[in-house]
Image: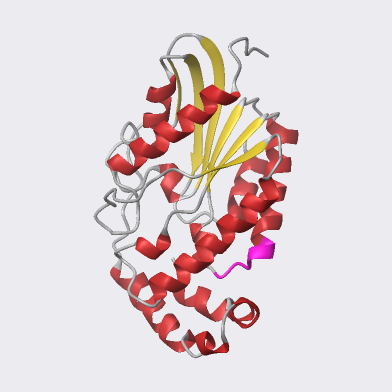
Amino acid sequence: MSQGRAAEQALPELRSGYSWRMVALAPLLLAQGLHVRRRIPRLPEPEGERSGCAGQGRPLRLLITGDSAAAGVGVGHQEQALSGQLVQQLAGDFQVSWRLLAQSGFTTAQIIECLRAAPVERFDVAVISIGVNDVTAGVGVRTWLARQQQLLTLLGERFQVEHVLFSSLPPMHLFPALPQPLRWFLGSRARHFNHAIAQYLQGHGQGELICPDLHGLTTASDGFHPGDASYAAWARRLADVIRARLPDTHSR
């Protein structure tokens, strides 16, 4: 996590998209970012399987990839995390062959490197959780959007994915672990990222932005990652979209 670096490197965006008064906050944001980086506990990735097959019905090949939220940080076992809860949601309708490729701290650039190095497989659906580490690392929104485009192309060309579901960045302006005004600053950047990819994906057949309603749900003990109820709500939203996207006669 490098919230302070975000404040420092995002100054060009502040100048173009915010009042010059916000530039004066940069030293405070930097100091708060360094403090938060030291203070937030580093929760481990949960134990449990990262691939498998479950359920009965139409075959569904599912890839889950991304950052610490995709990896399930915040709960004790993958069954409570996004992968486990999503597979459970889908297992009543599909025979789900699934794989989790995710790691805490991953930015979009690192996910792209990971997928390029992974064995080639065919997946019907890819679920993506990425962006928080790009926000905190100070990646500009134009660079970030270009990397989402690269990711979409890579999933289609290397893994033949027909349906790519990008999860929206979480409401960082509500993260209890972040003090103000850092919480406001990172929340604003997260909303900017969400707006950019939503605009890009409008009318895009392969990709779709999924915005689960996580308001009012508790976070993990670090005040930064999802808790099990948030993972369950996120999984339900994704499962509904996957069922809607895949016709009853789905086969390939």
Residue 200 in picture, x, y percent from top left: 69, 50
Q: Which residues are magenta?
A: 138-143
Does the image show residue 2? no
Total number of numbered labels?
A: 0
Left or right: 47, with 125 as reference point: left
Left or right: 51, with 163 as reference point: left
In the displayed orientation, state which residue is furthest to the left. 221
| Residue found at x 67% / y 57% | 145
Residue 193 in picture, x, y percent from top left: 58, 59
When the figure is inspected, residue 158 is found, relative to residue 110, above or below; the finding is above
Does the image show residue 198? yes
| Residue found at x 40% / y 65% | 173
Residue 202 in picture, x, y percent from top left: 68, 45
- Nearest the viewer among 147 and 188 is 188
Left or right: 105, with 75 as reference point: right
In which image quadrant can residue 237 be found? top left
Residue 84 in picture, x, y percent from top left: 38, 30
Decide whether residue 124 is among the magenta residues: no
In which image quadrant can residue 158 be found? top right
- Nearest the viewer among 104 and 126 is 126
| Residue found at x 39% / y 83% | 31
When the figure is inspected, residue 108 is found, relative to residue 173, above or below; the finding is above
| Residue found at x 52% / y 61% | 191
In which image quadrant can residue 120 be found? top right
Decide whether residue 141 is among the magenta residues: yes
Q: Quadrant of the N terminus?
A: bottom left
When the figure is inspected, residue 13 is found, relative to residue 158, above or below; the finding is below
| Colouring style | secondary structure
Q: Quadrant of the C terminus?
A: top right
